[in-house]
Amino acid sequence: MKVSIIGGTGPQGLGIAERLAIEGVDVIVGSRKEEKALDVVSKAKEELSDYDLSMVGMANEDAAKNGDIIIITVPLAAQKPTVEGIKEYCTNKIVMDATVPLETVIGGKPSRFIDLMEGSAAERTASILEGTGAKVICAFCNISNSHLSNIPEEIDCDCLIAGDDNDAKATAAELINKIPGIKTVDCGALEKSRIIEKITPLLIGLNIKYKSHYGGLRITGIPALK
């Protein structure tokens, strides 16, 4: 199984790519420009030379084409054109979206949320991919870049997911749970992404308030999705 990280050269995308690759997953790092993806992958392999990483770089379109599972990690402003650019390669695939509608897209604060017409960023991706058979899942929204890049420390944070296909969510959870410390919690239908995404600016605000980079979320008393 190959996992493609679309927009994988940014802190979040690269962090997810490295974490999965360390656990033996075949990862494709995508970027708008193939050269950037190749450069980032080369540097990642140098920095993590103690690990045998199966990681390659490609342009976003090629990454989506060659991946079995797709994870979108782009800013809100880039979400629509990016998803439209890879739409033809998403047919019948699991597409996890980590996009969060933050006010930074209009020059505002990262601790404030922007309401979207579709309800959430993940639902916007689903509307763009309508008719392709893609199974869209909101995932990775609440895990900080600092947690992801703090290798090899375990991540003290749950991953809340939402989606309309239970089998797809089970597959996504199996992948996410490979990352040490993470527990995947199924929050229900894709419309629950409206709540999941709104937790992110709260966590950002708490990290700013308490001068931390590792504020996260744990759900207690609820079984993890395995």
Image: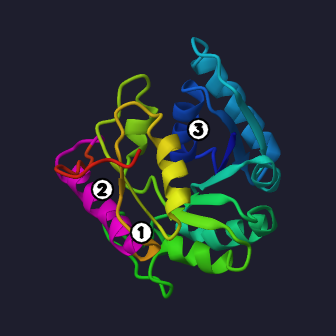
Question: Is 25 positioned to the left or the right of 165 in the image?
Answer: right
- Report if the CB atoms under discs 3 and 2 are less than 8 Å apart: no
View extreme (front): residue: 167
Q: Amino acid at mark 3?
A: Ala
| Disc 1 secondary structure class | loop
Disc 2 vs disc 1: Cβ atoms closer than 8 Å? yes
Quadrant of the rendered image containing residue 132: bottom right
Q: Say which of marks 3 and 2 sits in front.
A: 3
10 Å neighbourhood of mark 2: few (<14), some, or many (≥20)?
many
The mark found on residue 17 in the picture is: 3
Q: Residues within 10 Å of mark 3 (few under 14, many from 20)?
A: many
Q: Position of residue 140 (x, y in %)?
A: 45, 52
The quarter of the picture where residue 108 lies is: bottom left
Q: Determine the residue positioned at 18% across, 53% down.
A: 209
Reading the image, the residue beneath label 1 is 102
- In the drawing, does residue 94 fall left or right of residue 219? right
Identity of the residue drawn at 41% across and 44% down: 226
Label for residue 204?
2
